[in-house]
Image (tube, rainbow, N blue to C red):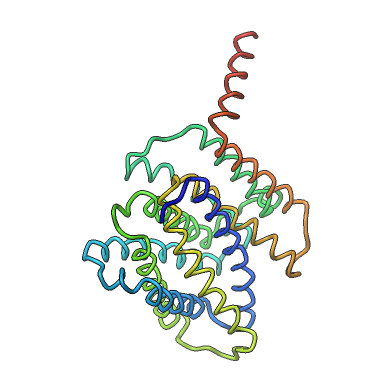
Amino acid sequence: MRMTRKTANLTLLIISAIWGLGFILTKTALEANVTAGFINFTRGLIFTVLALIFFRKKIFSMTVSDFKIGLYAGLINFAGFITQTIGMKYTTPSNNAFITATYIVIIPFIAWIMYKKQLDAINFISIAICLLGMAVLTGVTAKGLNINTGDIYTVVCAFFYAWSIAYISHGLKNTDPTIVAFMMALTQMAGGICHFIAIEGGRLVDVNWQVAVLPLVLMGVFCSFTAQTFQVIAQQHTTATSAGLIMMLESVFGSLFSVIFGFEPLTFNMVAGGAIILVGLVITETKRSLTFALVRKFHAFIKLH
């Protein structure tokens, strides 16, 4: 599938909105007493089945190289998920969201070290602005960031998410994105059932299935199959840093949907933090015209004074 960079970035924006809605679906399933491991297993199972239905010809013709590349992508992605899940148990939601978002700082360095991609100073300006926005959005600026065990797990999670985004953008070589998506589905399913059995004891107690079934199905179809498949495709047509910056909006959309569905009230921090993040995204997408002009004016001002 051919895409322009603008189309790819728009696709990633839509994916971020889907994942933002996924926060609400996950919260609903958890409140119905479905465990995190079983949620991930179910998402992976639905993802795998749909991938086999739609991409079976490519999947059954995959090479050993395709398998290794796809498995590598899937394992990195799942490592990020599992460390974030463990981190959530021991830290606050705001700390978890903010520290996870720091993956955007790590992406350029992984791309530079592993794939020889040039570091871009303008992107670091955007990254700094977006991190400030996340700090305001999550309330870290007011409450402070008190480091604990959960935060350490979340830092590890941020590293794996950064590695995953950089790898999907630069490391897939000639492998078909749909094969990579299928392998991500398999690892999500296998990792989910292993977590469910080993960590959660393999038991589901007092589950309200009338409430839980619809969120589980929607997460499997849209948050996993649709979003992750198109994520892999879209990232082949944009930079890893741009992809990371856009996908940071997942938290903004999550807050927005949380307000819309009545899980929490609209606050000044949500509006201000979301606006700051959008400014950072605008800068990275218009950097050659807007930012360079501002830098030139600043240098001219310094010379005059």
Depth order, front residue of 67/79: 67
Can residue 39 be seen in the rendering of this structure?
Answer: yes
Can you name the residue that lies furthest to the top here? 304
The quarter of the displayed image where residue 290 is located: top right
The x and y percentages for residue 182 are: 37, 69
**Image location of residue 300, percent across then percent down:** 60, 13
- Quarter of the figure with the C terminus: top right
Residue 105 shows in the view:
no
Q: Is residue 204 above or below residue 131?
A: below
Q: Position of residue 184 (x, y in %)?
A: 39, 67
Judged from this view, the residue extending furthest toward the front is 2
Which residue lies at the image location 52% right of the left edge and 33% below the top edge?
Answer: 122
Q: Quadrant of residue 302?
A: top right
Residue nearer the viewer, 269 or 260: 260
The residue at the far left in this view is: 64
Q: Tell me how many marks there are.
A: 0
Could you say where residue 62 lies in the image, as x and y percent from the top left?
26, 67
The residue drawn where x is 52% and y is 76% is 36
Above or below residue 257? Residue 31 is below
Question: Which quadrant of the figure contains the N terminus?
Answer: bottom left
